């Protein structure tokens, strides 16, 4: 039998950290989606404002102590936590609902009944929390418990002047902890550094019972041994979960209540230490946010003292900019996504919106995180999460204002388990905010975007992060100014970054006639102009426009710049060696049905009638892979490949029946591929929210490319990549969130 004693969990500003990837407001989520979680208003307010919160278990209330002592103990523990400046959050299960923070009447209700909840050591291995415990009861197997915690990778630290591991009623169990500390600041530093390193496990702080209450230890131990013998004789030892409550009750009887007094004392002491650690943790978070903190942590093993120091974080940008509370700051990112992180205020009407009627409509208003770069980064993070290394592989780099919206962006990003060391706080500026109006079907009708901050971002604040990480993949969104985009693209070329992706749209239209943002479509063109002559391949590896944005980019490149008059452009187009066979194959492809299972979507004639392929081919000297999001018509990919690098494609010939056309150059190693991917069938007819579906598609592609940089170099792997990407888009399309949490399961 493995277990730990009474437990106090420490959480600062984020109970949602225990439920990674879920919305910031648990109260809102439970109300909106039927999740049985109720967060006490006092706890909710503390979390929203980043104040220290101490989570208290309720098993000690519901069994092991008689009423009314159980109630008095619970009330005193909450008062002790409040005395440290922390907010108590006693967690219990009442009528099938999880309660985070209890009302006085709910405390009474729990105290006046009994139940048994087995300790789950695996949960401590999964949750990044500090667990304050009085050790392990001597009625349990302490040695095996400590060995099992070590196997799970959970650090066990004695909070005392020695390495002795406590045994609940006794300050010494005969076992030693690997490390020890003796003050709340050191404990807080350990927890904070674990979070910086992106570690997903918790830490057990073993706090011995106060010395003045240990005098009864010998008497209690004798009573415990007697109770154990009686349990074996009575057969109680074979009754599973009933053993522990029976033993605790019997020990109380044998000691005439002396064990109960000791039990209350150790619970109160654990609560006091937990509150003190939470307060120190909150101080560290505040100091780190303001750039004042240097982290030192004392770990003592035996008599020598070993000091582990974390170096001061790199300061990005000028003196007017700093970084938010970081998770983590030491591991280099594989994927860096730069651009806009915004607060989305979404209004969805429940009735038909009439354009000629100036009125308010009944509906729902929600506040969530948005922004193209942020959405893409979350999607990539969700697709790549699952290990400590991959959890920190994606870095969102975005400016935020020094305002409440900026604090919200930082807090909610952190609650998703994402890194926040790329969020750059700009003094005196307002965070990006987007106000969207959706109709009753979840389609975007119109919106107002206050996106001045990303456009005003300075290059030096970005380049420092880029040089620090030198990622495998770099994604840029169109909210960054042309000048800064030019600087970033030029620098990434010098650094040899494998792939640069430029993403544009704020939405994935479900009908090709719907409007989208085209202002950003051409901001990348000056960067291409500046780098075209020196680039041996296309300047940008991937671009992901929708149909409208593709046409806008083509028109600007042709009419408003000299790009299509550049010698480099002519040389690449000539190297394709396109002839009549290519045009014939395209005609055959255009006759194919959009979907083999949805005849009402028509044919692919739009790729010829609207000149989609022609425009994309003319942009290939600038963009190597053009992933065109066609909404309900699927995805069209046009790419230029090297026949030697993409030998699987080089061995193929055009096959319109399989939805691809290939042009092999007779004069060079160039190869041009046009491939259509039909839309995946959805399980719901009505889209809940289309604003982040396109971003989820792009984020999923980034995750695929991070795992396999050559995913587009063969027909089978490219089909698999786009299948995964479309799955991600559909999940978000049918989700009320900007990025569906279900992406983590793909």
Image (cartoon, grey):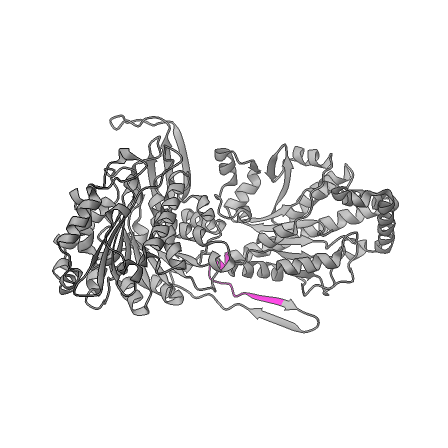
Residue that appears at 55% across and 48% down? 18
Pinpoint residue 579: horizontal percent, then vertical percent. 13, 55
**Left or right: where does residue 657 sit relative to residue 580?**
right
Q: Is residue 295 magenta?
A: yes
Q: Which residues are magenta?
A: 286-298
**Left or right: where does residue 53 sit relative to residue 524?**
right
Pinpoint residue 175: horizontal percent, then vertical percent. 75, 62
Residue 84 visible from this viewpoint: no
Task: Please tell me how many numbered marks the rendered image carries.
Answer: 0
Residue that appears at 79% across and 51% down? 139
In the rendered view, tell whether residue 589 sits above or below residue 128: above
**Left or right: where does residue 664 sit relative to residue 426?**
left
Pinpoint residue 387: horizontal percent, then vertical percent. 51, 57
Residue 204 visible from this viewpoint: yes
* Front residue of this view, candidates 705 and 212: 705
In the rendered view, tell whether residue 300 sits above or below residue 445: below
Pinpoint residue 304: horizontal percent, then vertical percent. 67, 74
* Front residue of this view, candidates 369 and 139: 139
Residue that appears at 46% across and 48% down? 744
Q: Is residue 715 magenta?
A: no
* Front residue of this view, candidates 654 and 590: 654
């Amino acid at each position: 039998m493995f277990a730990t004693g009474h437990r106090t969990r420490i959480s600062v500003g984020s109970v949602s950290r225990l439920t990674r990837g879920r919305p910031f407001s648990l109260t809102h989520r439970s109300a909106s989606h039927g999740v049985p979680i109720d967060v006490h208003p006092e706890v909710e307010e503390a979390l929203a404002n980043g104040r220290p919160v101490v989570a208290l278990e309720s098993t000690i209330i519901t069994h092991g102590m008689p009423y009314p002592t159980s109630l008095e103990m619970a009330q005193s523990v909450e008062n002790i936590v409040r005395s440290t400046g922390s907010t108590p959050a006693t967690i219990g299960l009442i009528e099938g609902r999880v309660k985070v923070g209890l009302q006085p009447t709910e405390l009474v209700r729990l105290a006046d009944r009994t139940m048994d909840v087995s300790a789950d050591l695996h949960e401590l291995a999964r949750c990044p929390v500090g667990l304050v415990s009085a050790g392990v009861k001597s009625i349990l197997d302490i040695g095996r418990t400590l060995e099992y915690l070590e196997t799970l990778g959970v650090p066990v630290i004695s909070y005392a002047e020695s390495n002795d591991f406590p045994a609940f009623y006794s300050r010494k169990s005969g076992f030693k902890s690997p490390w020890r500390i003796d003050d709340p600041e050191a404990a807080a530093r350990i927890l904070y550094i674990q979070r910086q390193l992106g570690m997903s496990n918790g830490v057990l702080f073993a706090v011995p019972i106060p010395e003045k209450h240990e005098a009864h230890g010998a008497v209690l131990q004798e009573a415990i041994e007697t109770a154990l013998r009686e349990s074996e004789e009575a057969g109680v030892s074979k009754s599973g979960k009933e053993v522990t409550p029976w033993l605790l009750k019997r020990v109380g009887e044998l000691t005439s209540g002396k064990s109960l007094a000791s039990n209350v004392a150790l619970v109160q002491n654990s609560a006091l230490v937990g509150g003190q650690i939470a307060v120190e943790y909150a101080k560290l978070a505040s100091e780190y946010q303001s750039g004042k903190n240097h982290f030192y942590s004392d770990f003592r093993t035996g008599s020598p003292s070993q000091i582990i120091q974390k170096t001061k974080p790199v300061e990005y940008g000028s003196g007017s900019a700093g970084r938010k509370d970081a998770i983590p700051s030491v591991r280099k990112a594989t994927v860096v996504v730069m651009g806009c992180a915004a607060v989305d205020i979404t209004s969805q009407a429940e009735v038909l919106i009439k354009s000629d009627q100036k009125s308010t409509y009944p509906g729902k208003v929600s506040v969530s995180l948005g922004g193209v770069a942020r959405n893409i980064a979350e999607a990539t993070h969700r697709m790549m999460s699952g290990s400590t290394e991959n959890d920190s592989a994606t870095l969102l780099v975005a400016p935020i204002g020094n305002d409440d919206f900026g604090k919200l962006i930082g807090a909610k990003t952190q609650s998703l388990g994402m890194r926040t060391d790329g969020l750059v706080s700009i003094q005196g500026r307002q965070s990006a905010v987007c106000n969207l109006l959706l109709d009753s079907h979840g389609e975007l009708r119109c919106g107002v975007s206050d996106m001045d901050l990303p456009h005003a971002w300075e290059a030096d604040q970005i380049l420092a992060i880029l040089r620090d990480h030198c990622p495998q993949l770099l994604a840029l969104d169109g909210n960054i100014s042309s000048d800064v985009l030019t600087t970033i693209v030029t620098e990434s070329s010098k650094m040899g970054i494998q792939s640069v992706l430029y993403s544009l749209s704020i939405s994935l239209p479900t009908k090709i006639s719907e409007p989208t943002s085209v202002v950003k479509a051409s901001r990348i063109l000056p960067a291409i102009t500046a780098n075209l002559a020196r680039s041996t391949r296309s300047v940008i590896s991937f671009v992901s426009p929708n149909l409208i944005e593709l046409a806008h980019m083509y028109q600007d490149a042709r009419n408003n710049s000299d790009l299509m008059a550049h010698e480099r452009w002519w040389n690449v187009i000539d190297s394709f060696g396109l002839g009549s066979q290519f045009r014939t194959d395209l005609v055959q492809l255009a006759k194919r049905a959009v979907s083999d299972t949805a005849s009402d979507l028509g044919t692919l004639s739009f790729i010829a009638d609207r000149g989609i392929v022609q425009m994309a081919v003319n942009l290939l000297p600038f963009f190597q892979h053009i992933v065109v999001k066609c909404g309900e018509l699927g995805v069209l990919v046009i790419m230029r490949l090297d026949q030697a690098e993409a030998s699987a494609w080089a061995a193929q010939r055009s096959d319109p029946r399989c939805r691809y056309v290939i042009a092999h150059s007779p004069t060079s190693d160039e190869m041009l591929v046009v491939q259509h991917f039909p839309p995946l069938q959805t399980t719901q007819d009505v889209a809940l929210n289309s604003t982040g579906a396109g971003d989820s598609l792009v984020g999923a592609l980034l995750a695929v490319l991070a795992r396999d940089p050559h995913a587009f170099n063969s027909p089978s792997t490219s089909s698999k990549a786009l299948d995964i990407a479309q799955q991600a888009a559909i999940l978000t399309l049918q989700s009320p969130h900007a990025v569906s949490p279900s992406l983590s399961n793909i």
